[in-house]
Image (cartoon, rainbow, N blue to C red):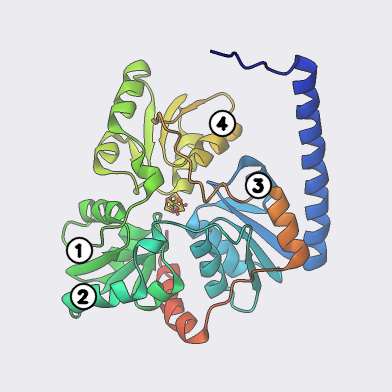
Amino acid sequence: MAVETLPPPQALLDQKENRQQRLTQLYEEIRQLKQQRNAVILSHLYERIEVQNLADHVGDSLGLSRQAASTDAEMIVFCGVHFMAETAKLLSPQKRVFLGNANAGCPMADMITREDLIQFKAQYPGVPVVAYVNTTAEVKAESDVCCTSANAVNVVRAVNTDKILCVPDQHLAKYIQSQVPEVEVIWWNGFCPTHLRMLPEDVISLKHQYPEAMVLAHPECDDPIKELADFIGSTTKIRSTAIQSDKRVFIVCTEDGVRERLSQDCPDKLFLTPTRACAVCPNMKLTRLENIRNTLRDLTDEILIPDEVAVKARKAIDFMMAIDG
Ligand code: 13P
Ligand code: SF4
C-alpha cells in the first residue's frame, strides 16, 4: 500500500501562518463592514469556533432570540440555521436580517410542513400546539405557542392544558413529558440526525474510563443518553453548568461546537464527546468568515416573511418570550 508523503514541517508551519494572516485580514474586513452597516453578528454555539469568536453575541436559540429582539443595530447577521434567522426577523421586523450562509437549513425543521401540521391538528380538535423553535415561520403560524430547549418545560406548564401537541422533535417532547407528567404530550416523529448519532454505549465506555466525569446532554438526544445524563439542558445551560462546576471532566452530548467552545472557555478542564462518528451538524458548519464578509458586503438573500404568516407566527413567539427561560 502506498504511504502518503506528508509535507515537511516548515511547509505546515507556513500554512498555519498564512491561515492566521487570512483570519486577521477577514476579521478586519468584517469589522469595517459591520460598522458601515450598523450590523450586529449573532452566533449559535454550534458554529465554527472562528465564527463564534467573531460574533457580538454567542448563545442558544432563546438567548439569541432575546438579543435579536433588543438590539439597536439596523441589521442582523445570524450565524446559525434558517429557522433562527427567521425567528430573529419575526422578533425584529423593522431590521434587515440575513443568514451568515443562506444555504444553512435544519433537517429537523423540514420534517414537518404547514400542511402536515394542519392534518395533525385535525386529528386532535381543540388541543393546543407547542412548536419547537426549530420549525419554519409557516409552521409557527399554525401553532399556539413556540418554545426552545431552554424553556420548553416552563412553556408547556404555562399553557395550562391537560393535553398538548408537540412538533417536530419527538425527543424534546419525551423530555417534556417526563418533566410534566400531568399533561399528555402527543408528539410528531421528527428528530435531529446529529444528536441521534450519539450512542449510549459510547457514554458508558467513557464513564468507565473517567468515572468522575459529569454527563451533559441536550434534550434532542435519545432517551438512553438522557438517562445517563447528570444534567439536561439547552446549549447555553450546558455551557454555564460546565463553567460553574467543580468537576474537571465532562462528557458533552450535543453538537461538537459546544465542546470546542467549552475547551476554549475552560482550558484546565477536559471535554469529551461520546461519538465515534463525530457529532457535527453539517448545516451549522456551513458558515465561514468569507460568507459573513460577503453577506455584509453584498446584502443578498435577505430574510423576508409574508405579513400574513409573520402576524400569526409572532403570536406564538410572543407567548414564549413572555415566559422566563
Ligand atoms: P439550543 O436552543 O439549545 O441552542 O439548540 C438549538 C438546536 O438546534 C439544537 O440542535
Ligand atoms: Fe437542526 Fe440538529 Fe443541526 Fe440543531 S443540530 S440545527 S436540530 S440538524
Q: Is residue 289 left or right of residue 257?
A: right
Label 2 packing within 10 angstroms: few (<14), some (14-19), many (20+): some
Label 3 packing within 10 angstroms: few (<14), some (14-19), many (20+): many
**Residue located at (80% from left, 40% from top):** 22
Residue 258: image x %, image y %? 51, 40
Q: Can you tell which quarter of the image residue 135 is in?
A: bottom left
The secondary element bearing badge 3 is classed as helix
**Residue located at (27% from left, 57% from top):** 173
Q: Who comes first in sequence, dot 4 or dot 1?
A: 1
The amino acid sitting under disc 1 is: Ile
**Residue located at (30% from left, 68% from top):** 158
Label 4 packing within 10 angstroms: few (<14), some (14-19), many (20+): some
- Please tell me the numbered disc located at residue 51: 3
The amino acid sitting under disc 3 is: Val
Relative vertical location of residue 194 with respect to residue 148 in this rendering, above or below: above
**Hey, which residue is sitting farthest front in the picture?**
1
**Residue pointed to by mark 1:** 186
